[in-house]
Amino acid sequence: MPLPLPNLDTRRWADLVDEGRALIPRHAPGWTDHNVHDPGITLVELFAWLVEQLIYRANRVPERHLRKFLALAGFAPEPPRPATAVLGVQLAANAGTHTVPAGTPFAATASDGRAVPFVATAPTTLVEAALVAAQSFDGERFVDRTRALREGTAFPAMGADPRAPRPYDAERAPALYLGFDRALPPGSAATLWLHPAAARAGEGVALDAEEAERRAACDRPTRPCAGGGAGGDEPAPPVPPMPAPSALHHSARTAWDYREAPGWRALDPRAQQVDDRTRALTLDAPVRLAVPTAMAAMQVGAVSAPLFWIRCRLVRGSFDDTPVLTAVTLNAVAVEQARAAWHRFPIAAGTVPAGAIAPGARLRLAIGLDERGVMHTLAVEPPSSSAPELLVLDYTAPTATAPGSIALPLVQLGTGSGLPEQHLPIEGAPVARGEVAVHTIEGTAGAARWRAWTARADLDASGETEPHASIAPAGDEIRFGDGRRGRVPPDGAAIVAAYAATMGTLGEVSGGRPWRLDDDPVAHARLGASFAAVAQATVGSRLGAAHGSDAEPVGHAAARAAAFLWAHERLVELCQGDACTTLDQLDGAAVRARPAPARATTALDLERIALDVPGTRVRRARAWTALDPVDACLEASGTVTLVIVPALPRRRPSPSPGLLRAVRRWVDRRRVLCTRVVVVGPSYLDVSVRATVRALRSADADRVRAAVASALDGFLDPLTGGPAGRGWPFGRDVYRSEILQVIDAVPGVDHVLALSLAGRAGDEAREAACDNLCLPPTWLVSPAAHAIDVVPA
């Protein structure tokens, strides 16, 4: 638990005066008048007042120090973050193919009528086709999922339990089929966005971060190989980069095909025909498809209409859980809730711009601004210039008598005063993610030059000549230094900034709200000739915009740090009592609500960590100390056995080798040194029940038989069975008394006449006619075929 901060302000003025008066006889025996009229007592009272003020100040921790402490601990308060969404853009008929560049502005209408601005975060190619049908194929039959796709309800992409056939046959492989009303244009990269129901936010980022840390820890300085050419030793050839871990599933491998006239043809990732970021349909991510030849309309599966089809099929491996999709978006444009700041700068009449300037051009400009933001100098500079590259949003050339204007993605915050600690407000704040590019334009009008300033959280480590600026925690103000910590902007220098403002949590928009392309100079400059086609398109987002946040208060960041740093104690509290040795039979939602510890020091920590390994879907985890799965009867000091259970295969869920490897690698970097962690799957005892029951007089024998078998299957289920309904407990025996209770609770059963239990583990069978079935610690039960005889009343 967090240690409470000590209260240092415990001494009062009267206490300090009494203590000082009590020391007078020891240090000044000749001083005998200790009354308040004595000047010495007055000095004692004065110093007691000063000491009391110092104690009060020492007991105070200002917010600036709290932010610094949290940053040192790795829990700096988060800046405002924009909400994110995925838009589907449906072009009008005969609109052609168009590209939406990054930074293109869109707008949503919130439920209260507010216009909420958004910008595209990545370029997207738009095609005319519309996604009109979807099917899932489990290897045996097609199921039409078009209605679920249209209504936005979840559906299994490849059936309930997809498995690649052996020997492999592409036509019998589980697959997701998507049908379009017209062919995708050859060579154009159409974008699909798949939304899995079980996807966790930031999972791909966590996978990449873990892989980067692992590689950094394993990297060693390379030594040159001996015996090279005439020049002596030559370095080893560079190793080609490995694919990002978020792009490859730890077990399942999928492939994308499209239907042409001769038949199905696979898309080749090496030829950049497909770029699948969904990690085998498990991440909320895009898929970009570029078919090389013409598609053909065909009737496929359960959909009678001839459509243009693509499919994603399972090639090998297995899933941890059934891949379920909540939505599939064609022409998917990833956007975030932000508005890029821009300003229309007036150009003084008589100014002669140097160089070719036109809307939509990206140029480096030499500009001169006065205090009112009016340009008196405008010239195009060479690419080698230190000026930032700017997108010209709009431009009207000045004449000798009439002023002009130029719209740029810049905002003039103010003018340098030459004084220390200058603070300037940011227009339209707060700034998204605290990211802002600050420049000053210094010098005379004819020799003005740009100076870039580095934005930092604070200026504590900044030198007196370093051009550093800090952004306020709320993201609404730029702060400069005092000449000792951070450079001071010179007097008269124009201070400009490029940034994107966000609304934080107010920028979240529910699904199904109206969307549109924002009609402003930014959209015209970025889209150019494609503006009209995109403006006439139908834009929408079925899932809406979410995950926006305001600037995090210091108290919330401190609570987040405490929750993470004391995650182990939170798990112990949840376990409740010394007799609790596992989280496995506790409420799953309550367990996952507790954050996973950064380091596994106990078996409880290992279980909690195993449930949240990025890229995996572990349903259950159970850890034993001093136990080796090879010989469970011997005590193995220093060894911890961690058993994990996914959701698949049905009946007997077992982890694939890839899942075991992924969990093992994750926990190995978080285990205590000198501890051996063995990650395995469970062993199963198939339990079959032979019972004779007497039915009630009004009961149907066949229904009673089916109900008894279903109740037994549910009770013996390794994921949802057991006495608590949270999966059969590891190593728990199967008791006859509980089986009798389960059968007796079935509607229509009067009583049980005979009962026997039988278990099978592989080729070994055990009969327990009058006894219970015993299980080793790492074993679970699985329901087998039951023999139920029903005797009429």
Image: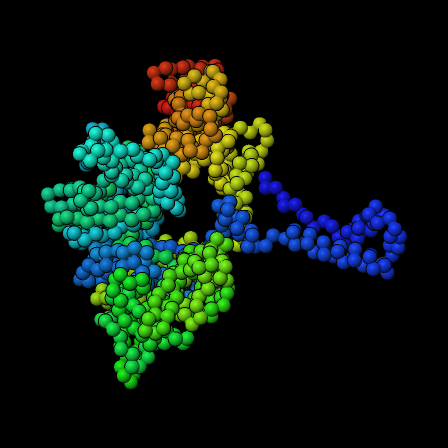
From this viewpoint, is residue 515 visible?
no
Residue 296 coordinates in the image, percent (x, y):
13, 48
**Where is residue 263, by image quadrant?**
top left
**Residue 207 placement: quadrant:** top left
Depth check: give the residue in front, 273 or 382. 382
Nearer to the camera, 53 or 280: 53
Looking at the image, residue 249 sits to the left or right of residue 672; the answer is: left
* Viewport quadrant of the C terminus: top left
Identify the residue at the far bottom of this view.
401
What x and y, as percent, mark residue 550?
A: 47, 57
Quadrant where the N terminus sits is top right
To which quarter of the image does residue 766 belong? Answer: top left
Instruction: Pinpoint residue 547: horizontal percent, then vertical percent.
Output: 42, 53
Judged from this view, the residue extending furthest toward the left is 262
Report x, y in % for residue 467.
42, 60
Closest to the observer, 779 or 120: 120
Q: Is residue 780 above or below residue 339?
A: above
